[in-house]
Image (cartoon, rainbow, N blue to C red):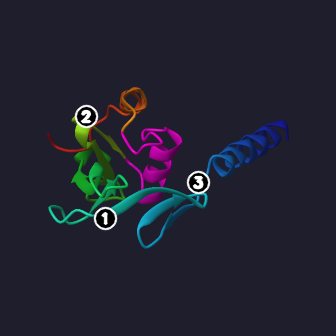
Amino acid sequence: MIKSKIVFFAVFFLSSLSVAFAQKVDFGSNYISMNQTEWLKFGPDNSYDDALNLLNDEGQPIILIRFLSSVNVDLQSEINPEGIIYYANVKFLSLNKEFEIQDDKNNVLALLFRSNVVNVDKTLNVSNVNSLKGKFTQLFSNK
């Protein structure tokens, strides 16, 4: 009985945290909005099939996000017989820095927003980019 209460409260607490930190991501005609606040312009990157450019107010790319997949035989299972991993490669263009994260588009954008990697003047915040990059060191790509 006590174990089930502990499990219930742990699940309730963790689900409350995810709701508390959730960001509402909207793609308007020109801007990505976070919680109804315009954040950055966006556009496709014609060099890659599944990529998203985040742009400053002048339309210059500052962040490139590529959504990729890779095969990892160690992850082969009944649920994932081919061992495919889906991940995002995030490049901070003017800083020549990048990291990879196993998450979907909206969560990657929300992470970038919450991490304050973009200053008010739409330039990259070097300190916050370095901090974020330090948290995600695992590479999913075959480099």
How far apart are the alpha carbons under marks 3 and 1? Answer: 20 Å
Question: Which of the two residues, 65 or 42, is positioned nearer the viewer here?
Answer: 42
Q: Nearer the viewer, mark 3 or mark 1?
A: 1
Q: Amino acid at mark 3?
A: Gln
Q: Residue at x 47, y 70 (%)?
A: 28
Other-residue count near label 1 (Cα within 10 Å), few / some / many at <14 / 14–19 / ≥20: some
**Residue on which disc 1 sits:** 43
Quadrant containing the N terminus in the rendered view: top right
Position in image of residue 20 (x %, y %): 69, 47
Label located before the other in sequence (2 or 3): 3
Position in image of residue 23 (x %, y %): 58, 54
- Over which residues does the magenta segment extend? 102-123
**Residue on which disc 2 sits:** 95
Label located before the other in sequence (1 or 2): 1
Q: Amino acid at mark 1?
A: Gly
Other-residue count near label 2 (Cα within 10 Å), few / some / many at <14 / 14–19 / ≥20: some
